[in-house]
Amino acid sequence: QVQLVESGGGLVQAGGSLRLSCAASGITFGANAMGWYRQAPGKQRELVAGVSPGGTTNYADSVKGRFTISRDNAENTVYLQMNSLKPEDTAVYHCKVRAVYTGVDYWGKGTLVTVSS
């Protein structure tokens, strides 16, 4: 059974940093596409950062230069390093993995990031 567990969210002042982690069981991140999404109050869910099985990364324009997605295949964990946080980054952040062999998406329950001004 595939499970994704996010951690690392919290309350931080503008300009601060957080690192989110997504630990997986039942699936190998290194062989599958994965990404971080967020949903802020009153807004649609959006892709923040993604990484392909080949290592290609992409970012939302709003976070380029501030956020970095990375993988640790040995630990089967993906990370989102968030620097220079802004109040508009406040959202629930979810980890998602798409199993390449089935096309099935798996989602974590999310971790809340709150950035105060």
Image (cartoon, helix red, strand yellow):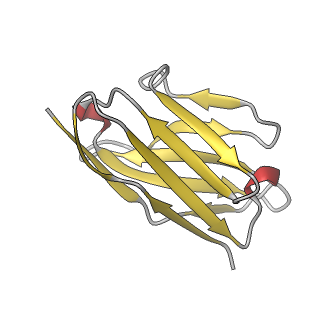
> Total label count?
0
Residue under the image location 69 percent in, 59 percent down:
75
In the image, residue 11 above or below residue 47: below
Q: Is residue 93 above or below residue 59?
A: below
Left or right of 17 in this view: 63: right
Residue sitting farthest toward the left: 117
Q: Is residue 86 above or below residue 28?
A: above
Specify whether residue 45 is in view: no
- Judged left or right of residue 109, residue 34 is right
Coordinates of residue 95 in the picture (x, y in percent): 54, 54
Residue at the outermost bottom position: 1
Residue 42 horizontal side relative to residue 56, left or right: left
Seen from this angle, which residue lies furthest right?
Answer: 101
Instruction: Say whether residue 12 is left or right of residue 22.
Output: left
Q: In which quarter of the image is the C terminus?
A: top left
Residue visible at 69% across and 80% down in the picture: 1
For image coordinates 30% across by 42% down, the residue present is 43
* Residue 53 visible within the image: yes
Tell me where residue 48 appears, x and y as whole percent: 49, 37
Residue 85, horizontal then vertical, whole percent: 31, 31
